[in-house]
């Protein structure tokens, strides 16, 4: 069972930056899709960014131009670089590892991001 842990959340002023890190307990299988989601109070969890192991990524419209998803060569760690943060980005951010063929999704426990105005 793969375990995921996020780090890097915190409190930042509007316009600031944070980099979130997700670390998996084991190397991810090929075809795994690495992702970041967020959930604000009273709202459903929503996609922020996803990326496959080939480096092809997709960002939500709200993230385009401000956020970047990337991974390192360890095949166990990926990042969400967030620039130009806005108060509406305040949420708990979760990383995920989904295998489209084997049908599982692993989630981290989440990290709080708070953007003050």
Image (tube, helix red, strand yellow):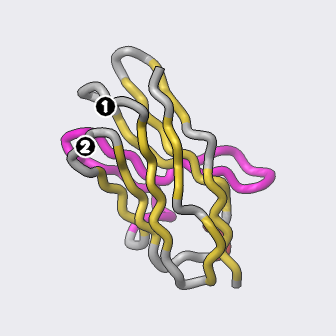
Q: Is residue 26 left or right of residue 2?
A: left
Give the farthest residue toward the front.
25
- Identify the residue at image location x=66%, y=58%: 112
Check contact, mark 1 vs mark 2: CB within 8 A. Answer: yes
Tag on residue 12? none
- Identify the residue at image location x=52%, y=61%: 8
Judging by the rendered image, the residue that carries numbered circle 1 is: 27
**Secondary structure at numbered mark 1:** loop
- Name the one closer to the observer, 89 or 7: 7
Q: Is residue 14 left or right of residue 83?
A: right
Please state the total of marks drawn on the protein image.
2
Q: Is residue 1 magenta?
A: no
Q: Is residue 60 above or below residue 47?
A: below
**Secondary structure at numbered mark 2:** loop
Tag on residue 74? 2
Q: Position of residue 33 (x, y in %)?
A: 35, 36
- Identify the residue at image location x=34%, y=17%: 101
From which residue to which does the magenta span run?
37-64
Q: Position of residue 54 (x, y in %)?
A: 19, 41
Give the farthest residue toward the top.
102
Q: Is residue 58 magenta?
A: yes
């Amino acid at each position: 069972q793969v375990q995921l842990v996020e780090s890097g959340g915190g409190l930042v002023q509007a316009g600031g930056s944070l980099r979130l890190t997700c670390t998996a307990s084991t190397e991810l299988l090929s075809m795994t899709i690495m992702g970041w989601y967020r959930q604000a109070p009273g709202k459903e969890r929503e996609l922020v960014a996803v990326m496959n192991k080939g480096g092809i990524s997709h960002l939500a419209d709200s993230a385009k131009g401000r956020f970047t998803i990337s991974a390192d060569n360890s095949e166990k760690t990926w990042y969400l670089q967030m620039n130009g943060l806005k108060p509406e980005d305040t949420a708990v951010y979760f990383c995920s590892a989904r295998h489209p063929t084997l049908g599982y999704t692993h989630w981290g426990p989440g990290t709080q991001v708070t953007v003050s105005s």
